[in-house]
Image (cartoon, helix red, strand yellow):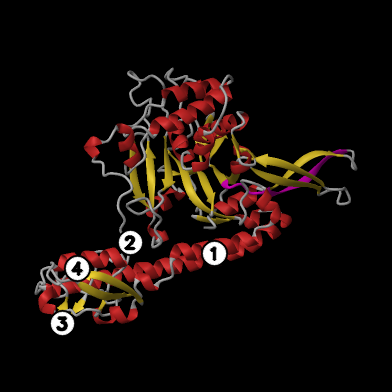
Amino acid sequence: MVTFALTLKHAGKSYTLPDFDPSAPAAVFKDQIYRLTGVPTDKVKVPVKGGMLKDDADLNKLAFKPGQTVMVIGPAGPIPQAPSKPVVFMEDMSEVELAQSAKYPVGLQNLGTNLRAHPWGNTCYMNSTVQVLRAIPELQNALNSAQGQASVPDAQLTRQLRDLYQSMNRTTDAFPPLTFLNMLRQFAPQFAERSRQTGQYAQQDAQEAWGAILQAAKSSSLTTEGGNFVEKALMGEYEKTLKSTEAPDEEPTVSKEQFLELKCNISMSTNYMMQGIAESLEQDIEKNSPTLGRQAVYHETTRVSRLPSYLTVNMVRFYWRRDINKKTKIMRRVKFPFELDATELVTDSLKQKLLPVNEKLKDVDRDRRERAKTRRKTKKRVEQQEQAARAEANGQPAPVQDPNDDPPEQVLADTPMDGELPDEETKRQEELATLLSLVHPDLEADKGANVSGLYDLAGIVSHKGASADGGHYVGWSAATPSGENGEAVYDVDPDKTEWYKFDDEKVSLVSKDKILALEGGGEDHCAYILLYKSKSLA
């Protein structure tokens, strides 16, 4: 066996292959190329006399010479490394290991599905809430690091939430949240109310469950860096200015108030979520005027003076109808954004602090989308070229090309390979450093505060039905795209992202179109609670 060195050239870089063996199969040569350049064996192309190198080619007949430069074509991936852990087959995994490797998160049993066997009432309101709150990884971290014994209902409920999440992480079967339900009813007795008609536990409001669970976590002093986790990461602050419309010379009063959610009021003219929120921040009230000595009309203007990392929006879809003594649902269609810019809701002071990062992050996000688009285009064109090459090698006609795509012969000339694109992780680290340099010192010091005013939609609780006393709740959370080994991917089309649908026991992946359908307009599912997550600087 005589071996010698070759120089491999790929995407403008040169690699030395020290032990090329012309007597070895061509597949071995391709594997050596893969280990040096990262171009997978099924995607690598090596131009040789007569076409591209095939797996069954005789390397001796191709007359490679010592020191020869060999061109390599194809998209590069990570350089292969030996596995850090031994390969474990599914049949050898424990249930915990299976749960950790499962494609979908686990569902929660609806304890009221069979009232004779499970007389605990319909629990979809609780299940959907728990699933969407699970989309906050920092909440689970705070729960897992909680110290001390639970001796009061709020701390006990918080501990049960931690135990519930841990149990869900250890199984692949839908989990029955009975212990958590019992503790929720002890903490907030309204969830133990029974229907006058049936005597069974009554349907409850998911928004009330959301508030109760987070109030318990807040009261139990669940901590994180900088203080109380709920206050820091999930609660914002209002600045309210009250001014008399009848006594203009009367000094306005300014007050501060914490909030757990923004309310989107829905009227006959409300078409957009931000419109409904803005309307809820302006109202007229009557109170005693010290200057007029009587009841007078005041206008209250509310602006947000602190934005949390996670912003909750409640679509105010239920109202009490006195004529039928029932909470009725507003069916009107209201559009909500997948990307939210909250700067129009904040005080002038906070806006000035947010704008530098806000404007720069918008530019960075546009650049990232363009780079992702280029990567998708590159990937598609390379795949088309490979299909054409395989067809030619098998003596088959070339695949029909999309008329909007360039001809195959132009692919190499017009399309950059992965190695020619900027390294995405390095580029993002540079962008992150720039963005961090623009963060206002006050916001940097306020752990858990949003520093840009920009958010991405992370979760939704939806309701189906005509009234709050019935119907069905479902949870939805954005699925984070990742590679086969959990690594970040940078070529995702934001218009084709997927979401998890949590319909009690049933968990499925759905397209973004299903989320758009939650705008409302009928008795079908419509968004009721929306959870927004601060747009990542990285």
Instruction: Check if mark 2's residue and mark 1's residue have beta carbons within 8 Å.
Output: no
Q: Nearer the viewer, mark 4 or mark 3?
A: 4
Check disc 3 and give the amino acid type. Lys
Task: State whether residue 269 appears in this view.
Answer: no
Check disc 2 and give the amino acid type. Ile
Q: How far apart are marks 4 and 3 (CA)?
A: 16 Å
| Part of the protein shown in magenta | 294-310
In the rendering, which numbered label is found on residue 49? 3
Residue at left 22%, top 71%?
386
Q: Is residue 371 above or below residue 221?
A: below
Q: Mark 2 Cα within 10 Å, few/some/many (few <14, many 20+)?
A: few
517 or 189, nearer to the observer: 189
Mark 1 vs 3, N-terminal side: 3
Check disc 4 and give the amino acid type. Phe
Secondary structure, mark 3, is loop
Quadrant for the N terminus, please: bottom left
The answer to which quarter of the image holds residue 43 is bottom left
Residue 251 place in picture, x, y as percent: 87, 48
In the rendering, which numbered label is found on residue 29? 4
Instruction: Check if mark 3's residue and mark 2's residue have beta carbons within 8 Å.
Output: no
In the rendering, which numbered label is found on residue 221? none
Q: Distance between the residues labelled 1 and 4?
A: 39 Å
Can you identify the residue that label 2 sits on? 79
Residue 433 place in picture, x, y as percent: 58, 62
In the rendering, which numbered label is found on residue 431? 1
Answer whether residue 303 is magenta in the image. yes
Check disc 1 and give the amino acid type. Glu
Q: How far apart are marks 1 and 3 (CA)?
A: 45 Å
Q: In this view, does 337 lie above or below 23?
A: above
